[in-house]
Structures are given as C-alpha cells and as structure tokens.
Image (cartoon, grey):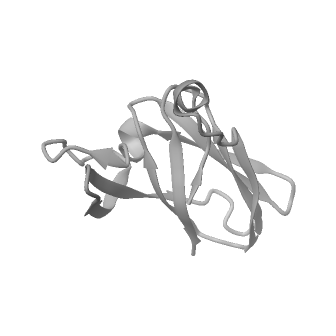
Amino acid sequence: MTQVASAQSRTSSGRIFPEAIRDIRVGRKARTLHFLHSAGGRMLLGSYWVHYQSGRTWEIPVSGDVDGLSLRFKDEEIHDVERATLAWVGKNPYTGLRLYKSTWENPFPSDEISSIDVVSAMNWLTLSLFAITVE
C-alpha cells in the first residue's frame, strides 16, 4: 500500500506521508490500467501520472466522488460511485473497510508505459493506492 499526504495528514495525524510517490516502474505496453485504491472525500485528491517511453505523459485525476470513497465506512453508508466498482469490503474491530477498482483505457496503447507517479492534490483527504494492474 502507498499513501500520499493530504492537508489533514500534515496537520493532525502526526504521520508523515510523501506528497508524491514517483517512478513506479511498469515497462510494458497496455490497453487498460486498473487501480485498486481508496479515495476519501468528494473532491480532487490527486492524480496518477503515466509516463511513456516516448516522453509523453498522461494525467489521470482521482476524485473521491467518482473513483472511490473512503477506506473506512459506517454500515449505513452507500458504496456506489460513478467511475469505479467496489472491489473489496472487510472489517476491523472499529469500522468497515472498502477498496475500489477504477479502470481507464490507455489513450496511447502502442506506446510503452515506463512508469507511473501518484501525486497528492494536498486537499483535506488522502489517496491510498493498493495495486496497479496493466493489461
């Protein structure tokens, strides 16, 4: 799991998360990219930056209201979001837990993806990434 910082994590949690996680190596071509993540809040939380071997980049903005809701939830909360599907639900002793899968079609499928960055928008809530799959 990777988590990037938010304004809240900088001011209240005492934990230090990076504002960006850079250079997650991919090294292959792909038609689709799948992200397993939690994205709390109904605001822009950050972006996935896809870097191609050709030098071009593609920004994938991540917003909590369309790409996945908070990792923690209360039983009565809804799970539906516009662009993602609920991928996993679990519990710990304190709260419910959930992860979402967001899928994007690669606009440059013939160009090899060299790496992906996860960059925080430094808004109040945070983006947590658990896995990336390319196919």
Q: What is the number of callouts on the image? A: 0
Which residue is at 86% across, 60% downward? Answer: 54
Classify 55 as above or below 45: below
Which residue is at 52% across, 44% downward? Answer: 127
Classify 27 as above or below 23: below
**Whole-percent x and y of residue 92?**
29, 58
Left or right: residue 120 versus residue 78 is right
State the quadrant of the N terminus: bottom right
Location of residue 46 (image quadrant): top right
Q: Can residue 31 be seen in this view?
A: yes
Classify 45 as above or below 4: above
Q: Is residue 33 visible?
A: no
**Whole-percent x and y of residue 56?**
81, 51
State the quadrant of the C terminus: bottom right
Q: In front here: 11 or 128? A: 11
Location of residue 29 (image quadrant): bottom right
Left or right: residue 54 versus residue 111 is right
Seen as rendered, the residue at the extreme left is 76
Q: In front here: 90 or 84? A: 90
Location of residue 16 (image quadrant): top right
Left or right: residue 89 versus residue 33 is left
Q: In front here: 92 or 54? A: 92
Which residue is at 52% across, 61% downward? Answer: 130
Left or right: residue 36 versus residue 79 is right
Classify 123 as above or below 39: above
Which residue is at 48% across, 32% downward? Answer: 125
**Whole-percent x and y of residue 78?**
19, 44
